[in-house]
Image (cartoon, coloured by chain):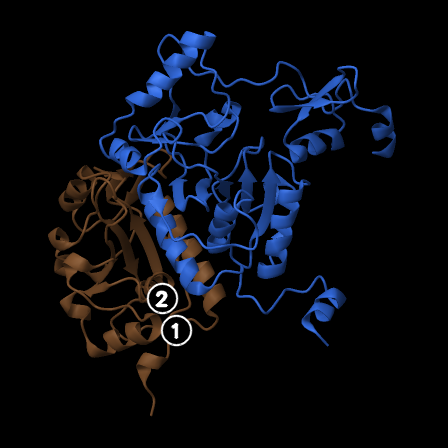
Chain colours: A brown, B blue
Amino acid sequence: MQRPSLTGGFRDAPKDAAFAFRAVMNTMAKPGEINSVTGAEPPAGLSIAAGVVLLTLCDPETPVYLAPRFDLLEVRDWITFHTGAPFVAASAAHFALGTWGELPLGDFPVGSAAYPDRSATLIVEVDDLRSEGATLSGPGIKDSAALSLPDRAAIQQNAALFPRGLDFIFTCGDRLAALPRSTKVS
Amino acid sequence: MTQIEQDKNAPDTVMSDYNFAYLDEQTKRMIRRAILKSLAIPGYQVPFASREMPMPYGWGTGGVQVSAAVLTPDDTLKVIDQGADDTTNAVSIRRFFEKTAGVAVTEATAEASIIQTRHRIPEAELREDQVLVYQVPIPEPLRFLEPSEVETRKMHELEEYGLMHVKLYEDIAQHGAIATAYAYPVKVEGRYVMDPSPIPKFDNPKLEMAAIQLFGAGREQRIYALPPHTQVVSLDFEDYPFEASKADHPCGLCGAEDSYLDELIVDDEGGRLFMCSDTDYCAARQAVGHRGSDASPTLEGVA
């Protein structure tokens, strides 16, 4: 019997994950830059890019929160088989997967003033990802960059918490962009 | 045939008994997550579960772990130790990744996609598509002023950096100028005071660059980072501004006046030679015909 949860992982994990991480690292270092990634074939409903990020960064040490739309048996099984990450409520999550509207932004850990790194990274599935819209500035950006963002006010609020705060990875098909807390949005 | 014999017979093949770039995947994921957080909070030292590496602490175990987590099979690696490609530390780290990751290596700064460095920034300007990985001995800039980690963490939390300014002021009171010549503290994006690793302060202005800069401290278990174009300001006073200084000589071999110089004692009568610390920069200049006052005429004949 064919079990879809057992397929669709990295074929050559060390090398696929290395290429994927470089793409993710470049997007996190250069907010607004859009990169494409390959290597994962996640279950229907989940974008390739979101699947690649999960396979690259998640393992049994990183609790994951799934927003209702993605909290399906096949998604859970796929993540469990390929990463072993446990599923938790938003308040205990290291990573979260969902659409913008479904992610309870206020519930995720934002780190403490002493340990701002103990904060969640949100993988946000978006329908549209373009280098236009909100203007970005800050570390990683030479003068300014542009990125289509779902909600400017909430992201400005998050940036105001710096050095605490959430970090976002926006995924759309096989493309991704990142928005760390250090980026100023206008 | 034993493993040793196999290796001896085929020294150039990639060691397939190790995972790509030596570290296991779960370790690399842990380091990669720390790198992402460090890029999101520039200048903040992210704790990570540093592993024992097959080299002693102080030989770049932090830098090696960061490089291993960042390397892809397509990368070209350059390793320098105080600017030089041909010192023991640089050669052994380069060979380590040649064997365990099978990546291409180079000595030319412009050809490298990842440059691991100990205590220097290359003279050539780095590009957006390059990554500079630093080996860091003591990541905490306040450590020699305050030995307690609990206290220094509190100081970073509260942005309480007065002690560092007192230290620089005491330099001025005792020596008439800020005497700190390397590991000169910087402030990142107006928030965290950061140790740029023991690079000469001549290199500090280059910390604002187009490449991604990652700092790994293996023994101290910290990773921190500077995304491209991050604002990095060397601490100073209005009346004693920061000055990027170097030996007041041209390079004796290539004649460069804009590069950081090493002083070499060449005989037992006090004879000395100033030469570029960046060997690739110096060799490239000599290759196109630049000559310093101490360049040996035989060199010219050879070239």
Hey, which residue is sitting farthest bottom in the picture?
A1
Is residue B112 in view from this perspective? Answer: yes
Q: Nearer the viewer, residue B145 or B190?
A: B145
What type is the residue that disc 2 sits on?
A: Leu
Q: Is residue B174 left or right of residue B117?
A: left
Chain of the residue on which disc 2 is drawn: A
Residue closest to the eye, B254 or B243: B243
Q: Which quadrant holds the N terminus of chain A?
A: bottom left
Q: What numbered label is drawn on residue B160?
A: none
Tell me: residue B109, above or below residue A24: above
- Residue at the disc numbered 2: A55
Nearest the viewer among B152 and B120 is B152
Q: Does residue B298 appear left or right of residue B169 in this picture? A: right
Q: Which mark is residue A9?
A: 1
Q: Is disc 1 placed on a helix, strand or loop? A: loop
Q: State the residue at coordinates (18%, 65%).
A: A88
Task: Please provide percent x and percent y for residue A147.
Answer: 28, 46
Which chain is disc 1 placed on?
A
Q: Amino acid at mark 1?
A: Gly
Residue B293, horizontal then vertical, whole percent? 77, 17
Q: Secondary structure at mark 2?
A: helix
Residue A33 visible, this angle: no
- Residue A113: image location, x then y, percent: 21, 40
Quadrant of the frame with the C terminus of chain A: top left
Left or right of B302 on screen, residue A155: left
Question: B95 above or below B161?
Answer: below
Question: Image quarter for residue B79?
Answer: top right
Q: What residue lies at 28% left-to-right and 62% top-to-bottom? A: A62
As measured in the structure, the alpha-carbon distance from the residue carrying label 2 to the one carrying label 1 is: 7 Å
Contact between labelled residues 1 and 2, with CB atoms less than 8 Å apart: yes
